[in-house]
Image (cartoon, rainbow, N blue to C red):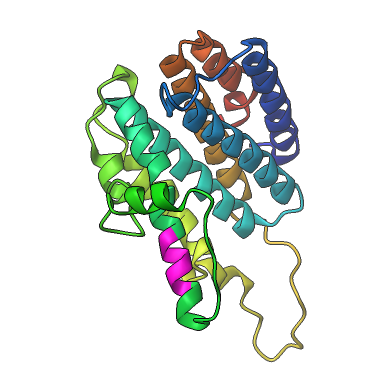
Amino acid sequence: MGTASFLKAVPRYIQRVERLVERCKIFPRPLGATELDQILLALLNRSNNTVKAMVLVATKNYGGEATALSRVLVEQWLIVRWMTNKDEHERAARFAQYEGKQVQKALERLHAHDSSIKVTHKQDTEMKKFAALYSSHIYWAGTLRKMAEEPEERDASLKPDATWYYNIPYTIGSWFVHSNVMGVRDLAPAPRQAFKFRRKDPNYTDMAVMMGALCFALTTARISDTLGLGISDQVLGLYRKHVEKHIR
């Protein structure tokens, strides 16, 4: 894989996808009708920002940090796949309403450290109602592993499920997110030599960008299918043309 040409190809791919999406002139339905449009498009926006940030980090040869960002892209893909696999309107609502539980937990933690803090939310009553729907402040719909394990119902090319994404790239990315020994081993200094900061960590860079770009493509294509944008084939075709060819 030619790293320099590869890292130049991915930003060009992202720009082409951005133009494709924006030419669709998407007008999200209001929240009173469904949360689906705004949630999916917010996730798409986050995926787009994350993949661009990952490429910027990768071009500086910060492989560990690029891998951590690629994990975020894998997670975004797994969430979008699960949300749109079935019952998408109900699942999008569950995602959106989880804000109530997160706000509640944040306020509880603030008060635990300083009981004099008085914080109110402009939608306090509604937030409390939504918070009561969730038993966990960590999981809005079960674990990410369970999401990945749900059998694929929409796209035959993705069957049987998405566990590979969880077991391989997500797990590798976790080494760097949590800074465990696997995530720092390449930065260990040589014995009996004066310590110097290593500002480059090229290992994993190509893998991170490859997987991050793929998950961005899959996320965009899935959202296109769900919202009826009609650009999924173009999104994946551009990925194969401009990105995948550098991997072979």
Q: Quadrant of residue 101?
A: bottom left
Give me the residue at 49% from left, 55% from top: 173
Foreground residue among 37 and 246: 37
Give me the residue at 56% from left, 20% from top: 240
Magenta residue check for 214: no
The quadrant the N terminus occupies is top right
Give me the residue at 49% from left, 81% from top: 115
The prevailing secondary structure element of the residues shown in magenta is helix
- Would residue 214 be found to the left or right of residue 134 on screen? right
Magenta residue check for 106: yes
* 44 over 236 or under it: above or below: below
Foreground residue among 227 and 180: 227
* 133 over 87 or under it: above or below: below
- Would residue 130 be found to the left or right of residue 236 on screen? left
The magenta span reads 104-109
- Residue 11 location (% of width, % of height): 72, 31
The quadrant the C terminus occupies is top right
Foreground residue among 188 and 211: 211
- Would residue 210 be found to the left or right of residue 130 on screen? right
- Residue 218 location (% of width, % of height): 48, 27
- Residue 222 location (% of width, % of height): 44, 23
- Residue 244 location (% of width, % of height): 57, 26
Q: Quadrant of residue 48?
A: top right
